[in-house]
Amino acid sequence: MKALKSQLAKDLLADDQARNELRRFLVSNRSKPSSSKGEAVRIQFRSGTSAVTVSASVVPKAKTD
Amino acid sequence: MNVALPAIVIFFVLLPGFILRTRLKRAERTSLDFSPFGEVVAEAVVWSVLVHCLWLFLSYVIAGQVFQPLVLVKLLSGAVTVQESAAIAFAGSFWWITAYFVSLLIAAFAFPVVLRTLIVKYRLDRSSSRFNYIFRFHKAPWYYLLTGADFAEAEAPDMVLISAIVEVAKEAVLYVGVLDEFYVDSEGQLDRLVLQNVARRPLSKDKSVVEADDGNVVNTELARFYEVDGDSFVLRYSETITLNIQYVTLSETE
């Protein structure tokens, strides 16, 4: 089954440079204390003919109550 | 050749309930208990009763056809002489009965697709929905965890990050990547995860900062991780020691 992945995420993963930026975000996210994990990281990538800048941040899971 | 007519009648009467139940439920376990008084059969029988009540009502309203329980009881009888008169009545209404079952089977295929589409589109099954006790697919926990189906549409994240510890050559290795696909086995257990953009490092190299030669503290996180080549990395769940799941949101900025 396909996992959660928005079109924006697919576009980002299609850009080699943005993939490296994202990987940097993934691994650096591991080493930070939990209080700073919500910090956003800016990543730039090409989507079609335009350049898009996004800020990536870890969010809490959905409320279950 | 002897034909067990009652068995065929029961099969056709219960078939719509089985089809409807199977296509409506989102269950990760596909190895099901089909024993006569098991959950699956019980649910299918209940669905059959409900859809037949609805279809008989519609047949009466639309075409004025009245259900004749005596004919059904006679068809289910083991005595050939009793079945004969019912068979004559059946033959007299053959096209109506055929239309009844064909339309019911088509509806049993189509209705669950429409209902599931609506449930997913309006997220009626998410945990905080007021209708979740009716619409939630309780037997699909991985679906809710890994597809973000529990998030409200406006709050849905953009991707799922996976961190998994796997033992490789008697050493624990941490893999980090973006989840692309996941598969469950027939028992409903997570079978494998397909990751993208994967990096890994031995768990033993767990310190994030070291002191450089010049005395400055530097972050070595990037240096300790190294990229895993390839577009898709398949991780078998049975080989993972721990699994961490995080959701990432991407917000467009100017």
Image (tube, coloured by chain):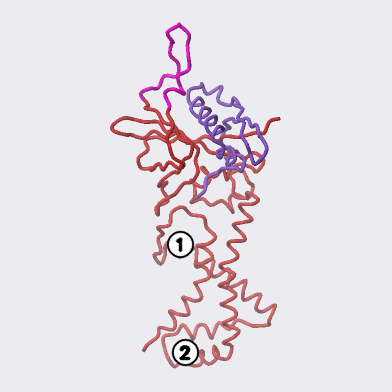
Chain colours: A purple, B red
Both marks 1 and 2 on one chain = yes
Q: Please name the residue shown 42% across and 46% down the image.
A: B190
Compared across the picture, whether B111 is left or right of B240 comes to right
Spatial CA span between label 1 and label 2: 31 Å
The number of discs equals: 2
Neighbourhood count class around disc 2 (C-alpha, 10 Å): few under 14, some 14–19, many 20 upward: many
Q: Please name the residue shown 54% across and 31% down the image.
A: A22
Identity of the amino acid at label 1? Val
Subunit ID for the residue under disc 2: B
Q: Which residues are magenta?
A: B204-225
Which of B102 and B157 lies nearest the eye of the viewer?
B157
Identity of the amino acid at label 2? Gln
Residue of label 2: B83
SS class, disc 1: helix
Which of B78 and A64 lies nearest the eye of the viewer?
A64
Q: Please name the residue shown 54% across and 90% down the image.
A: B91
Question: Is residue A34 placed above or below B44 in the rendered structure?
Answer: above
Residue of label 1: B40
Residue ranking furthest to the left: B170
Q: Please name the residue shown 40% across and 60% down the image.
A: B33
What is the x, y in percent for residue A62?
Answer: 58, 38
Neighbourhood count class around disc 1 (C-alpha, 10 Å): few under 14, some 14–19, many 20 upward: some
Q: Quadrant of the N terminus of chain B?
A: bottom left
Compared across the picture, whether A46 is left or right of B75 comes to right
Subunit ID for the residue under disc 1: B
What is the x, y in percent for residue B77?
Answer: 44, 85
